[in-house]
Image (cartoon, rainbow, N blue to C red):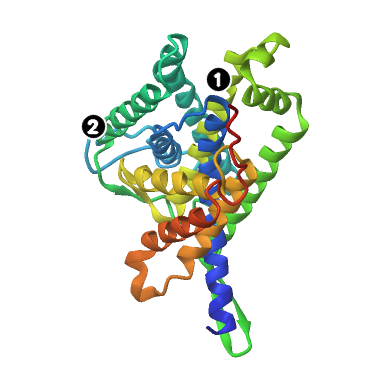
Amino acid sequence: MELSQLLQNVLNGLAIGSVYAIFALGYTLVFSILGIINFAHGAVFTLGAYFTYTLVVGQFENNGILKGINLFPNGSPFSGNPWLFALATLIGAAVAGLVAVLIERLAFRPMRSRGADPLLALVSSLGVALVVVNLIQLLVGAEIYNFPSDAYGQVQPALSFHIGDRVVIVRTVQIIIFAVSLVMLALLGYVIGRTKVGKALRAVAENPGTASLLGISVDRFILITFFLSGFLGGLAGTLVGTAFGVAGPYFGVTYGLKGLAVIVLGGLGSIPGAVVGGLVIGLAEAFVPAQYSAYKDAVAYALLFVILLVRPQGLLGRAQIQKV
């Protein structure tokens, strides 16, 4: 492989891998606290994209109950300015976080208060996910909606640079996605590692009973965990939507499955593992030849299978010690 093609693939892999990472972190945060997988996370991912699209465009013209309704007859105030688009993205992610909190109240807390088997909570979250995606389809239809081309402002669609006599082309949106993902990963790392909230979250993840005896409100920090999880999922949804379009109510399902692969590859409950797993799978997909692009998902899962054969706990996970 030529150096220019190698660099092209690395840049593509880092861009999509960073989105996988921040999306998978939402899974990881909930799993580290409750020890269960939130299958509604993919639906929250989808909602984040739709919320931001609603703020930026303000109407759904194709289908659904909301067809023809224009929230901004004089044009959306969030369109055409990159800073206002960034604000719309944060608002959309925050609303997605609030939806995740509502899901916790409806699907997880009742099960937890009754001491139900974790499998029942998992099934409950799957049911909520199906309700959410069908509600989206009822409201706005199943068509693809694309963000405006000037969502990030008047920037060049792509940047190119030369390596020898070869040209490497990188879409500007990929650079933005990668930069935003790095900032979010750094902020989350700071919150978890350096703040009182992060220390309390780690205490709850380690032992909820002991944390409660130390005066930490376990229920409150579970809500914070779900908000952070939903915020990251909604943000990832918007980033993917700006790059590839909002591909219908079920487009979060594919990323939901990929997110599960990421956290298993990186190590269940490991935040650094989710980051590494996302980048590894993103790079693996990027190096699939173009003529075999239809099989790139298979390559990612084959890589997951091989690594788990060698290291069952994942790349950065810890082996579980059974006490007898």
Mark sitting on residue 138: 2
Q: Is 139 located above or below residue 49 in the figure? A: above
Name the spot of residue 65 as percent of width and height, x first.
23, 30
Q: Residue 223 carries which label?
A: 1
Front residue (pair 242, 313): 313
The image shows residue 14 at horizontal and vertical percentages of: 57, 60
Question: Quick check: can you spot residue 105?
Answer: yes
Residue 109 coordinates in the image, percent (x, y): 46, 15
Of tags 2 and 1, the one toward the viewer is: 1
Q: What element carries label 2?
A: helix
What residue appears at the point 61 percent right and 19 percent down from the top-left corner?
Answer: 221
The residue most toward the right is 194
In this rendering, the answer to whether 147 lies above or below 101 is: below
Name the spot of residue 256 as percent of width and height, x first: 41, 43
Name the foreground residue: 44 vs 243.
44
Residue at the image position 65 percent from the left and 50 percent from the top: 182
Amino acid type of the residue tagged 1 in the rendering: Leu
